[in-house]
Amino acid sequence: MSGHSKFANIKHKKEKNDAAKGKIFTIIGREIAVAVKEGGADPANNSRLRDVIAKAKANNMPNDTIERGIKKAAGDASSVNYESVTYEGYGPGGTAIIVVALTDNKNRTAANVRNAFTKGHGSIGTQGCVSYMFDEKGQIIIDKEECDMDADDLMMLALDAGAEDFTEEEDSFIILTEPNIFSEVREKLEKEGIVMASAEPAMLPQTYVDLSSEEDIKNINRILDFLEEDDDVQEVWHNWNE
């Protein structure tokens, strides 16, 4: 499924950029705080926290940093409370963009997101205006260089674990699950020693939009760059066919 591989490539590039900026640790730190506040500090009893820890490890966050984040969130009642907010809008050429943020100041975040869209000649829409064009999935990306298992064996392992789709790309394997069993599938693969480059919920475009105008391409890149520079922004999904 080419759509999935395109998304995986976008995701890889975004996370490499974030890591270079040091942003990915900030993102994960906030996710740890939210997960602990919602479900407690014990990963054995908190599947969301287990998922965030897996994401942290996939991004090479040190164990002591993860543990400090959990302890801080569990022990500091006065710590910042982050709220999840989602924005939907349109980029150049009718592209669809979804922005997920964790923020302690919704007014600030809304203004920053709106500004990013405006600078790229896009526009914020109402809730639900573009999300119907995406499918919510659990997505696991496995770097071929980190995987010793044969592709067919890995596919059977993933499908037996409950995955709904397995795709082999040039440099990676992509495993998709339904959202409600994502944690279960990830944990089964983890127990088999599968190293994951990325494992998290995803919004996958049902179709992609081609942009031929250099001006449109410049503008959508401007939107995405501004969004990725914002510390409140956790994820950006879009259907531009890069």
Image (cartoon, grey):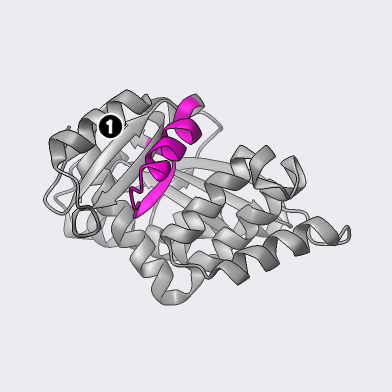
Q: Which residue is mark 1?
A: 157
Going 73% across and 57% down the picture, which residue do you hit?
105
Amino acid type at image mark 1: Leu
The correct choice, above or below, for 228 with respect to 21 in the image is above
Q: In the image, residue 190 lies at what x, y percent? A: 41, 44
Q: In the image, residue 29 lies at what x, y percent? A: 62, 62
Residue 157 in sight? yes
Mark 1: few/some/many CA within 10 Å (<14, 14-19, 20+)? some
Asked if residue 28 is among those painted magenta in the image, a careful observer would answer: no
Going 19% across and 47% down the picture, which residue do you hit?
211
Helix, strand or loop under label 1: helix
Going 88% across and 57% down the picture, which residue do you hit?
77
Looking at the image, residue 242 sits to the left or right of residue 118; the answer is left
Residue 163 in sight? no
Q: In the image, residue 116 lies at what x, y percent? A: 48, 59
Q: Residue furthest left?
A: 170
The correct choice, above or below, for 25 with respect to 5 in the image is below
Looking at the image, residue 27 sits to the left or right of residue 121; the answer is right
- The residue closer to the viewer here, 20 or 215, is 20
The correct choice, above or below, for 209 with respect to 63 in the image is above
Q: Quadrant of residue 197?
A: bottom left
Going 54% across and 43% down the picture, which residue do you hit?
87
The quadrant of the image that shows the N terminus is top left
Q: In the image, residue 160 lies at what x, y percent? A: 31, 24
Asked if residue 197 is among those painted magenta in the image, a careful observer would answer: yes
Q: Residue furthest bottom?
A: 21
- The residue closer to the viewer here, 103 or 12, is 12
- In magenta, the rendered stretch is 181-203
Q: Quadrant of residue 108?
A: bottom right
